Image (tube, rainbow, N blue to C red):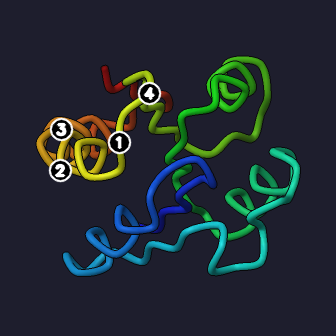
Amino acid sequence: MRFIVDAHLPIEISSWLSGRGYDAVHVRQIGLRDAPDASIWDEALRTGSVVITKDSDFAHWAISRTPRPSIIWLRTGNMRRQPQIDHFVRAWLGISTRLAEGVAIIEVR
């Protein structure tokens, strides 16, 4: 499974996923740090990646557009870097289960 981690999230999330055998990159690593959301969306479609984001635009697009990548939408509000990483790690089992079930938009609160 492939993942693209959006700009407003810590790069450590992609590192954590990579360390568990997933193909995960942060937008900074693929030259999309300052890219518009549409470019990240297109890259996710091109590579078959799941987008991990805090940006509601991706979730709204996933409802109204096809084809669409799966979206992991972190709705945690403002958090410092480490608590945000820890929250993602704690939520991973539920996230991975829902991805395996084919859920297109996974909200993490």
Determine whether the residue tagged by mark 3 lies in a helix, strand or loop: helix
Marks 1,4: beta carbons within 8 A: no
Label 3 crowd (10 A; few <14 / some 14-19 / many >=20): few
Alpha carbon separation for disc pair 2 and 1? 15 Å
Mark 2 or 1: the one toward you: 1
Give the total of numbered labels. Answer: 4
Marks 3,2: beta carbons within 8 A: yes
Q: Residue at x 35, y 50 (%)?
A: 81
Alpha carbon separation for disc pair 3 and 2? 5 Å
| Residue matched to label 3 | 91
Q: Quadrant of the rendered structure where residue 80 is?
A: top left
Left or right of 61 on screen, residue 74: left
Alpha carbon separation for disc pair 1 and 3? 17 Å
Mark 3 or 4: the one toward you: 4
Up-down: is 69 above or below 45? above
Q: Quadrant of the N terminus?
A: bottom left
Sequence-first tag of 2 and 4: 4
Label 2 crowd (10 A; few <14 / some 14-19 / many >=20): some
Amino acid tagged 4: Asn
Left or right of 33 on screen, residue 20: left
Alpha carbon separation for disc pair 1 and 4? 7 Å
Label 4 crowd (10 A; few <14 / some 14-19 / many >=20): few
Sequence-first tag of 1 and 3: 1
Sequence-first tag of 3 and 4: 4
The disc at residue 80 is: 1
Amino acid tagged 2: Val
Amino acid tagged 3: Ala
Alpha carbon separation for disc pair 2 and 4? 17 Å
| Residue matched to label 4 | 78
Q: Residue at x 75, y 26 (%)?
A: 61
| Residue matched to label 2 | 89
